Image: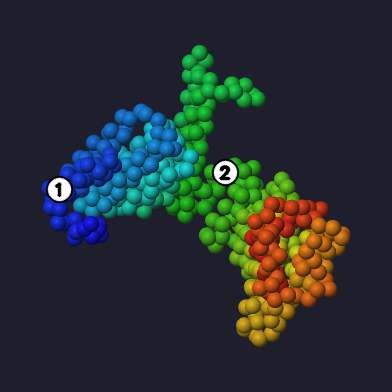
Amino acid sequence: MPPKKPLTAKNLEALGPERLAELLIEIGDANAAVKLRLELAGAHSSADVAREIRKRLNLIARSRSFVDWQNRRGLVEDLQTQRRAIVDHVGKTDPKEALDLMWGLMALASSVSARCDDSSGTVIGIFHDGVSDLGRLAEAAKSDAKDLADRAFQALLDNDYGQFDHLIPTLSAALGDAGLEHLKSRLVALSKEPAKKPAEHERRKIGWSTDGPIYQDEIANRHRNHVVEMALRDIADAQNDVDAFIAQYDPATRKVPRIAAGIAGRLLAASRAAEALQTIEAAEHKRSDWPELEWEDARVAALQGLERSGDAQAARWSCFERFLSARHLRDYLKRLPDFEAENGALNYAENFANFPAGGSSVPGVMACVGSRGETRTGARGGIKRRSLRSAVARRRRVGQQASFGGDARLARDDRVFSRSRPIQPIQTRRAPFAGMRQSRPFDCGFQKMGICCRPLISGHGLHSLFD
């Protein structure tokens, strides 16, 4: 039996060009054939590649068959091949032609999304990459700003599947001030046009709500208003015009915590910290016990921007107290000169009454304080990590035993929570938990406190608390 030769380019050269061409035709699928045609066209000129791409885009546009998730791969590869060919083959030699081809590819987004199962988001991701390519190609082609703005305006109106959500930030450099102003004027003019409402007998019902029928023209008008508002906000960001951004929200909407946080962030970037804090404090919270961490972060940043470090520290600690946020505790501890708050943080964490489901905040707080202790130990040579963790472990075991109240199921393994038994070496202590990771869920008794110890066992390992 002859020895096997590895599949390398040098060994394939021995077959000769004619035999290699025959093999490519035999084994190639539809997408491989498309790639070959593009490569052959590219060997001649970029104009030939552009011609092949246009033919393929027209063929995809005419297609009407539904593509389910099992056949989606072929469509994804085809779209990716065309996008890469536009950028790599045409874009390097003729940016203007490549820009026009990329607009043609983006025009397929609505029809392709309507006839395929894109539950994974792979197909729309290709068009998002295409938007990024539009920005680079537009800069390379040095397109006329007003023409580019007109094309962007039409694309925003056709943004049915979110394919053009980031178009303005991407094109802002190529548009420049003149293009952005032209696009803004067209959007403002569109917003002033009266809403189109056909005659009653021509209106199409597309659904029902508690208020009655839903008409297609109503949805279209809402979509138009939404497109205009989002585009004007993007233009305001591109022009660094904070007041124009704020003007897109009515006074009631500005009091929504998430919106207020976004406005405050832009005011801080514009060195308007006092207005940022005023905006933050004017927000209205529907639920005081619900964490609005984006709002909390914006408030801390505003206080820090006003050089009110003490108030910013108090806000971080308050956020930790209310939501047991390890991130805010970490930021709080970083700004402390010594160990003054670690014991307080541990005490508060152990007695916290509003644990989230799973109790995953406790290990985060322990890790936060433990890492802080490590950092300080390395710098000052003070308290060692083991002594801190051992103290934590002892306190937790006492509290856990009290909460179990002598549960018989816990007594089956007194190696886990035993007050009298000394701490075992870590290699030995891991054994009781190894079986728990693969066993079925059990009622550990923490349910009375709203905590389940299983995430602590499987996600963090209780042995880590004894290090």
Q: Which mark is first along the chain, 2 or 1? A: 1
Q: Nearer the viewer, residue 336 or 367?
A: 367
Q: Nearer the viewer, residue 465 or 54?
A: 465
Of the two numbered discs 1 and 2 in the rendering, the one whose residue sits closer to the viewer: 1
Q: Which residue corresponds to mark 2?
A: 249
Instruction: Give the residue furthest to the right.
Output: 405
Q: Which residue corresponds to mark 1?
A: 19
Q: Position of residue 281 (x, y in %)?
A: 68, 54
Residue 144 visible to an observer of this rendering: no
User: Helix or strand or loop: what does disc 2 sit on?
Assistant: loop
Query: Callout 1 environment at 10 Å: few (<14), some (14 to 19), or many (20+)?
Result: few
> Callout 2, which amino acid?
Tyr
Q: Position of residue 188 (x, y in %)?
A: 45, 38
Real-space Cα distance between discs 1 and 2?
67 Å
Q: Position of residue 119 (x, y in %)?
A: 48, 40
Name which residue lies at 68% across and 67% down: 431
- Residue contact at pointers 1 and 2, CB within 8 angstroms: no
Instruction: Give the residue furthest to the front.
Output: 1
> Callout 1, which amino acid?
Arg
Figure quadrant of residue 336: bottom right
**Quarter of the picture holding the C terminus:** bottom right
